[in-house]
Amino acid sequence: MAMTKAEKHQCEDVIKHHARDVLSGKNHIMIPYELDAVDEKALTTMTMALVKVSNVTISETLATKIAQEKLNKQFLSKRMWIPISCPMIHPSILTVAMVESAGWKIAEYFAN
């Protein structure tokens, strides 16, 4: 089932709000390519908020696993251009872009 416009708007708000928080937290997890580490709690909170948009209930532990899986898949799928773009783009910007992209993958996963 596709997301409604209202759900897309809610997801966009959630993703943008949480994507900027992933670099500022204290519970950092390392991600590939030596980019900036992201805050695990912010990822989990983003996932829980995205799940709520789809009226699904999951545990915080499962939300953490899903967030990490989607984020890692985003980095692995972009592995060819990340080393090329890293000298030109600050790692923080690239990290936030990957988190936003993973957020949309999470939202799509629960919309179906």
Image (cartoon, rainbow, N blue to C red):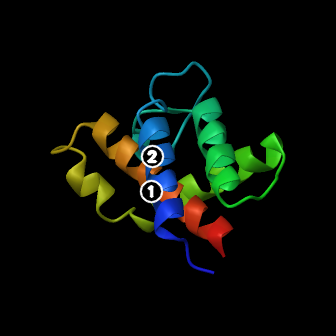
Count neighbours of disc 1 (C-alpha within 10 A) and say few if under 14, some if 14 to 19, many if 20 or more.
Answer: few
Residue in view at x 41 percent, y 46 percent: 33
Amino acid on which the number 2 mark rests in the picture: Asp
Which residue is tagged 2? 13
Left or right? Give the position of 75 relative to 90.
right
Task: Indicate the position of residue 6 as horizontal and vertical percent values.
Answer: 50, 61
Rendered position, 97 above or below 19: below
Would residue 97 be seen by someone viewing this image from the given angle? yes
Label 2 close to label 1 by CB (< 8 Å)? yes
Q: Using the image as rendered, state which of residue 109 and residue 38 is in the foreground.
A: 109
Which quadrant is the C terminus positioned in? Answer: bottom right
Task: Indicate the position of residue 63 as horizontal and vertical percent values.
Answer: 73, 48
Left or right? Give the position of 111 relative to 56.
left
Left or right? Give the position of 73 relative to 65.
left
Residue in view at x 31 percent, y 55 percent: 82
Rendered position, 11 above or below 80: above
Residue in view at x 45 percent, y 46 percent: 13
Left or right? Give the position of 111 relative to 11.
right
